[in-house]
Amino acid sequence: MINQNQENIINPSIESPSSNGYKFSWFDWFCLWYPPGWLILFNRHWQHYHCDPDGWNWLEYILFLIPGGFYLAIFIRWLRLGCRTPRQETSEFDPSYQQLFSQEILAPIVEHYFHGELHQLENLPNTKPMLVAINHAGMCFPWDFLSLCYLLSKERGWILKTLAGVSLFDHAWMIWWLPPGWSTVLGGVRAELNEFTTALQDNTILLYAPEGLRGPRKGWQKRYQLEKFDVSFMQLSQRFQIPILPVICIDNENLHPWSTNLQKLQRLFKLPFLPLSPLMLVFILFPSMGVWAAKSHLRYFIQPLETTHLQQNDKNSSVNKRAVSYQQAQALREKMQNQIHKLIKK
């Protein structure tokens, strides 16, 4: 997982199709305009560069676009696959495909729909590895993460990885929604300590939400109120001497407005969150809208780089070290919270 510029050689597995690139047809522009069609864009782009025999076909795509049609599409696909779920293959991160997806799919969405902007570029360093810490919110598909990845890649040619909840890889909805290994191929790192540790050891620029799932799960009533920061990212930053770049996102709270989390049902269905909002009535009719979010103006304010240090001496027990890391993590939280208050008042 090495930071690379945009002169990467295309992976041989996708070299031939990429010579033509993915060109938007009228149907793709329609899908970009019509919210239930975003899932079609993701899958069509994947199928342009990868063999996906278990993937969606044209009849099923058309069904996405009509109320309740997605349920019929799943049933037809299930029958077509011999009454089984799509095969899940072992996948690896592919920086070449990440760049193609960023340039050909994320670019029109981030620039023309979310109107993503980077601010305070003077704080953007050239160092690597690095941990980019962002306030995560919205109770929806992680568009604040994907948009920041696109903007940083466009600005510096960076290849980034993102720490993502395990459900983004393994949940049944994801297995049916998206191609096999989609999250991993695009740079997703499972939010598990071993995966997290390995990613930080590999000279990576890793995007991370210190609030964890508490951030997007908190709901509309607590918008722009940062939840408690995890300690693990501070401990690993200290252990490997990796600096932290705080980034504050404004307007990601509006990606799914007026939402609240149904905790009991969320736990029952093993989901990261289960929102209740007026938009959920539409989602019930169009489940393919699970990768969509409300139109927002995502502004990212880059803060000065944070370097972390832990005094090393024989008297420091593991408990004391954890206490110090906890204090530093919450101090960073307080600093970011103060900046958020200032920015939303402007």
Image (cartoon, helix red, strand yellow):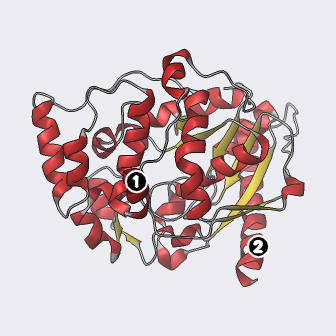
- Give the structural element (helix, strand or loop) at label 1: helix
Task: Compare residues 135 and 310 and report the one nearer the observer.
Answer: 135
Query: In terms of image quadrants, where is residue 89?
Result: top left
Q: Which residue is mark 2?
A: 338
Mark in front: 2 vs 1: 1
Q: Quadrant of the N terminus?
A: top right
Q: Which mark is residue 192?
A: none
Q: How many marks?
A: 2
Q: Is residue 198 left or right of residue 74?
A: right
Q: Amino acid at mark 1?
A: Trp
Mark 1 Cα shell of 10 Å, populated few (<14), some (14-19), many (≥20): few
Task: Compare residues 289 and 278 and report the one nearer the observer.
Answer: 289
Q: Name the residue located 73 percent from the left edge and 42 percent from the top edge.
A: 131
Q: Amino acid at mark 2?
A: Asn
Residue 322 visible within the image: no
Q: Are marks 2 and 1 in contact (CB under 8 Å)?
A: no
Residue 129 visible within the image: yes
Q: Measure the alpha-carbon separation of dots 2 and 1.
A: 45 Å
Mark 2 Cα shell of 10 Å, populated few (<14), some (14-19), many (≥20): few
Please provide percent x and percent y for residue 258. Answer: 43, 78
Q: Is residue 185 left or right of residue 135?
A: left
Query: In terms of image quadrants, where is residue 84?
Result: top left
Q: Quadrant of the C terminus?
A: bottom right
Please provide percent x and percent y for residue 16. Answer: 51, 20
Task: Compare residues 284 and 23 and report the one nearer the observer.
Answer: 23
Which tag, 2 or 1, sits closer to the chain's start?
1
Q: Which residue is mark 1?
A: 26
- Give the structural element (helix, strand or loop) at label 2: helix
Please provide percent x and percent y for residue 43. Answer: 37, 41
Task: Compare residues 316 and 9 and report the one nearer the observer.
Answer: 9
Q: Name the residue located 59 percent from the left edge and 43 percent from the top edge.
A: 102
